[in-house]
């Protein structure tokens, strides 16, 4: 039985004050909810406010990226050491917006992933095809390639906390959601690849989230799929009521 993980990705939205305001409304709405694991991945500037707000609750706070070195002359970057010092537990890695706009490659995803796992953070590693790849029938190859490269030289023992998010790029922020069947098929491809790389036992326990225009209205049909182990939610996670409704699908 895999406990579902419902993760918010705030992208580049909200100030520390807006973060406190969000949690003032969100925390009472999900109080006592332990069917699913809940994490809110904020911009780095909001992490401290978020962590302060969730103290004593079952809600975790995550980052949206992390560098692979623990310190150094890397202007503008944040390390695993820094995240851990704040109390961050989760980190999104390889989001398609980072791949698209910030030169993220499969190799840098692999380096970030290794660093996050080494530090004991729970990485949420994003994979997913763009529309042209889906239309060309190459979705499965793209997902396999992204997994092989992201997981390169990581042993099943080291990959313990790994979470994967299947995020078809054509469904992110577009209002177009993959049907539960499309998502489940992609998840099976990812799980098979994880079995090849890490072994069957690891793959059976691996949580694979779906992300792409998840909203309160479609969360329950998506979450009803056995293959879908939670959601990575962008736009609809910015509003406390809407994210709470998704958590309670
Ligand atoms: C995301 O940012 O990971 C995402 C899935 O965004 P949205 O829910 O807005 O499509």
Image (tube, rainbow, N blue to C red):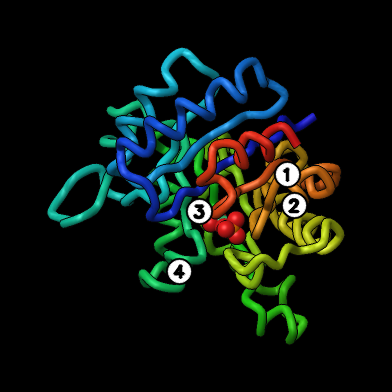
Q: Secondary structure at mark 4?
A: helix
Residue occupied by mark 1: 203
* C-beta proximity under 8 Å, tags 4 and 2: no
* C-beta proximity under 8 Å, tags 1 and 4: no
Residue 240 placement: quadrant = top right
Q: Is residue 126 visible?
A: no
Dot placed on the residue nearer the N-terminal end, 1 or 4: 4
Q: What residue is drawn where x is 62% and y is 42%?
A: 242
Residue occupied by mark 2: 191
Classify mark 2 as within 8 Å of ligand 1 or not, answering yes or no: no
Q: What residue is drawn where x is 73% and y is 44%?
A: 203
Residue occupied by mark 3: 153
* C-beta proximity under 8 Å, tags 1 and 3: no
Residue 53 placement: quadrant = top left
Up the image or down, 209 lies above or below 25; here it is below
Could you tell me residue 137's position as x and y percent? 77, 82
Could you tell me residue 246's position as x and y percent? 68, 40
Up the image or down, 75 lies above or below 23; here it is below
Q: Secondary structure at mark 1?
A: helix
Dot placed on the residue nearer the N-terminal end, 2 or 3: 3
């Amino acid at each position: 039985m895999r406990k579902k993980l419902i993760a918010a990705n705030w992208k580049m939205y909200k100030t520390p004050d807006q973060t406190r305001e969000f949690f003032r409304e969100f925390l009472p709405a999900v109080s006592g909810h332990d069917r699913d694991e809940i994490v809110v991945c904020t911009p780095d500037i909001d992490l401290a406010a978020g962590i302060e707000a969730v103290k004593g609750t079952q809600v975790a706070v995550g980052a949206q990226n992390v560098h692979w070195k623990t310190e150094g002359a890397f202007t503008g970057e944040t390390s695993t050491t820094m995240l851990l010092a704040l109390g961050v537990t989760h980190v999104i890695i390889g989001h398609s917006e980072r791949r698209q706009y910030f030169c993220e490659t499969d190799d840098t995803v692999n380096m970030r992933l290794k660093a996050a796992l080494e530090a004991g953070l729970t990485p949420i590693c994003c994979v997913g095809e763009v529309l042209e790849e889906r239309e060309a029938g190459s979705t499965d190859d793209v997902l396999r390639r992204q997994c092989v490269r992201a997981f390169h030289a990581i042993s099943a023992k080291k990959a313990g906390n790994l979470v994967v998010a299947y995020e078809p790029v054509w469904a992110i922020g577009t209002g177009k959601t993959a049907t539960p069947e499309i998502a489940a098929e992609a998840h099976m491809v990812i799980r098979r690849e994880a079995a090849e790389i890490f072994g069957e036992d690891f793959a059976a326990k691996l949580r694979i989230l779906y992300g792409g225009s998840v909203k309160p209205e479609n969360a329950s049909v998506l979450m009803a799929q056995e293959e879908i182990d939670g959601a990575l939610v962008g736009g609809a996670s910015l509003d406390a009521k809407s994210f709470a409704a998704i958590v309670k699908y």
